[in-house]
Amino acid sequence: MNRENSQHVRFLGIAGAGLSALAHVHLARGGAVSGSDAQDAPRLDALRAAGAQVRVGAVTDPGELAAELVGVDVVVASSAFPDDHPELLAARRAGIPVRRRGDWLPELTAGYDLLAVAGSHGKTTTSAMLSLVLRAAGLDPTAVIGAEVAQLGGNALVGAGRVFVLEADEYGGAFANLDPVLAVITNVEWEHPDVFPDEAAVRAAFTAFALRVRAGGTLVACGDHPGVRMVLAALPHGHARVVDYGLDAGRAWRAVDPRATPGGGVRATVRHRGEEAGTLDLALPGTHTVLNALAVLAVATELGLAVPDTLATLATYTGAARRFQRVGTAAPTDRRGPLEIVDDYAHHPTEILVTLAAARQRAQSRQVWAVVQPHTFSRLAALMDDFAAAFIDADRVYVTDIYAAREHDTLGLHASDLAKKIFVPETTYYVPWAGLTDRLVTDLSVSLPAAPDGVLLLTLGAGTITEIGPRLLAALDGRPDR
């Protein structure tokens, strides 16, 4: 398919996972890209190498902003940019069309067979797995994914085929105007309390998304999840063909007896409409990973791919950045067992719960330590009790300071409030951010001789917590993964 586009698009918030991928797609189609972001990030290096002109840091002078907009045809802004942001005001003064991500995505995906993967959790892994499967099958897809995927060369693919795989985000209504021929809904629950006042509002957004599936299209949905079932119940009869998946009996696609494998992954028997269809082997742990893979199996089969081929490709999937990503190992001489460090984007109670369950499955006789950085004051306030109950599979928990992201502290919350409520109080500690690495080094040196099989330590959160693993490895003279 010829998708050349000579427009000059300026992306505001270009370092973000969402917009950086869109910028890569536009560059690959022959368009010009410029952009700005408040902070530098590693993914900007790849964009610059591909030809993007990127400015890092704030500029408020109207003359400077006007100069940056010369030759720009359209501005695409992250949903985090307020309407009165100086760069948006400058674009409007210059008469340049301004699009939010949710407005730009329908233009980007028009004319494709759009496969839109949505859900409160799991959409990045599902989108990445699906893109890998479709590429291996020769469909040459285009894809936009919410994290870097080493096997795909980044967070975007630009292929010549008819299929477009899109991680469809509910935040800021980004998925509201899509036109998918097939949609996936992995789960539906209250998330982004700064946007959705309650769970009913989230369900309404996902119901509207499901209604966007084209006439005669297909909706692949996790029938085990109560929020998904409520969305399906709200759809008019016959709106779209529904293919469900899960662990429960009666699902069209079902995984039976998921179990840990010696290499730290998970294996399950797959049944399709009651008949055994094969064995699912995954390199990553966790029942939630099995569910994501089931969704991919369902979609791939709908597209005519053979189940054995899909299973074979899924077995090769090594993960996306910050999704149970192994950072490395360390083995100081004053202890016996190895230390393994894993980093994960989990920043919602459900994500933390399933990630720690996967860690417990992988750790076996090792201890599991969780180091969590709460993400935004509004999320912690709305879901405090759920957060407190999410660490049941951890032997020890460290809570550090709240990562504010786009928010300011107007709620009077402190990370220590969470530390006091977590259900393993005797081994839960609040540690200020500035002293976190030193505290972990000290505790590992003191405690690990009493843990002869070692420790699996997870860093959890959507902010700067990802920096801790490499710092620990450096302090303990460990070995980073390559």
Image: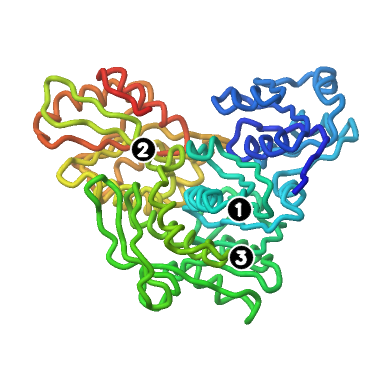
Q: Is residue 169 visible?
A: no
Instruction: Tell me the SS state at disc 2.
Output: strand
Mark 2 or 3 closer to N-term?
Answer: 3
Q: CA distance from mark 1 to mark 3?
A: 33 Å
Q: Which residue is mark 2?
A: 372
Q: In the figure, is residue 388 to the left or right of 309?
A: left
Q: Position of residue 62 (x, y in %)?
A: 83, 21
Mark 1 or 3 closer to N-term?
Answer: 1
Instruction: Tell me the SS state at disc 3.
Output: helix
- Residue drawn at (69%, 26%) of the image: 36
Pointers 1 and 3 in contact (CB under 8 A)? no
Q: Which residue is mark 1?
A: 139
Q: Which mark is residue 204?
A: 3
Callout 3, which amino acid?
A: Ala
- Residue drawn at (33%, 62%) of the image: 279
Q: CA distance from mark 2 to mark 3?
A: 31 Å
Quarter holding the C terminus? top left
Dot 3 surroundings within 10 Å: few (below 14), some, or many (20 or more)?
Answer: some
Q: Quadrant of residue 232?
A: bottom right
Q: Position of residue 424 (x, y in %)?
A: 22, 46
- Residue drawn at (47%, 49%) of the image: 125
